Image (spheres, grey):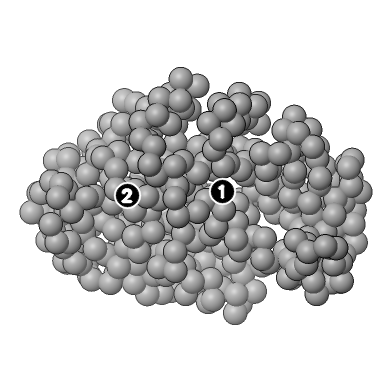
Amino acid sequence: MSALVASDVAAVQAAVREGRPLLPVAGGTHPASVPGPDGPVRVLDVSGLAGIVDYDPAELTFTARPGTPLAEIEQMLAANGQHLPFDPPRLGPDATLGGAVAAGVTGPGGFAAGIRDFVVGVRFVDGTGRLAAGGGRVVKNAAGFDLPKLMVGSLGRLGVMVELSLKVFPRPEATASLRFPTVGLAAGLAAIAALARGPITPLALDLAADGAVTARVGAAAELIAARAERLARSIEPHGEPLAAAEHGPRSATSPGEVAAGDASHWGEARRFAWVGDDARLVVVPTAPRRIATLDAELDSRGLRRRYGLAANVAWIAWPEATPVAELSALLAAHAMSGLVLTGAPLPEPLIGAAAGGAFARRIAGALDPRGTFAGGSR
């Protein structure tokens, strides 16, 4: 089934008013949630609904259409010393703002700031074809019922976003990353806890399955070395700076090499290069106290995994050849839920324990009374 194409609001409204099931898609970098070509649900291609509508660096906000590439937004913000601190994943060069908000996933570098806190305004077409709006273009005007936050993580099932307003933060002048060679998951979790409550708030905290911890800090250029050194000495074992030659026979520690190593590490992290082409990326919200039990299950299956956001999320590489139903059952047994982001289209990318319940169904019924948007609410 060919996709419908909508490059303006009127075309979106016309597609919705037809009443047939549809799901909006922009960059297509979350393919597991995209309807299959032979199913009853149509793809509504909104990639042409792109472009920056408004940007006021002094207000620390911008407004853009959902098909706007994240790369374009990042370049615009960087030119003004600003950034998206929730570090949206870059699962492909075509990743868009609308896809980031619809997935609702905070990236590996976003420990200090979740995506839900940064969407301050939205215009969207609801299930009746009506153009609705919530929030505003500046932070101080974002009042009333919080429709913007409802759209975060909605997977396009509550409406077709046609315009989004986000707040941004000043970009740290310099960053540095440190690896704490903690051995074993329990020791790594203890290190994560100590760093999270320490005197220096990290920008990112990442935990490997072997227990190694990676932390990132930001500061003014003249202060970053001292700040990184203070963090490195704050716990045992002491942290070691990441460097461009970190995988070579000897780690380099000059400022330029450390900066290169920092950028390389987090660039690969937000692209999830470690997942590989033979596996699906699955994100599972969790908590540090639940990591050990989950990790034992994943380790027994030989799965690649990492724990991000100070061990509050699990990133799992689930083999493409293995039915996702197996992971769904595993998560449900531990009262956890997950979102499959990549891999072949699935009938349902939300897996594990059902989330939302009656309240979510009431919201979906109010915004989409005819059930036009694929999947409805769990």
The quarter of the rendered structure image containing the C terminus is: top left
Q: In which image quadrant can residue 338 be found?
A: top left
In the displayed orientation, state which residue is furthest to the left. Answer: 18
The residue carrying pointer 1 sits among few (fewer than 14), some (14 to 19) or many (20 or more) residues within 10 Å by Cα, namely: some
Q: Which mark is residue 278?
A: none
The residue carrying pointer 2 sits among few (fewer than 14), some (14 to 19) or many (20 or more) residues within 10 Å by Cα, namely: some
Q: Which mark is residue 344?
A: 2
Residue type at tag 1: Gly
Residue positioned 45% across, 55% down in the render: 277
Q: Position of residue 54 (x, y in %)?
A: 43, 74
Q: Which residue is mark 1?
A: 114
Residue positioned 29% across, 58% down in the render: 25
Q: Depth-wise, is mark 1 or mark 2 nearer the camera?
A: 2
Q: Is residue 37 visible?
A: yes
Residue positioned 84% across, 72% down in the render: 255
Q: In which image quadrant can residue 324 be found?
A: top left
Label whose residue precedes the other's in the sequence (1 or 2):
1
Element marked by disc 1? loop
Q: Position of residue 375 (x, y in %)?
A: 24, 40
Residue type at tag 2: Ala
The quarter of the rendered structure image containing the N terminus is: bottom left
Q: Is residue 146 visible?
A: no
**Nearer the observer, 348 or 126:** 348
Judge left or right: residue 305 versus residue 29.
right
Using the image, determine if residue 309 lies above or below residue 252.
Answer: above
Q: How far separated are the C-alphas under marks 1 and 2?
A: 27 Å
Judge left or right: residue 82 versus residue 186.
left
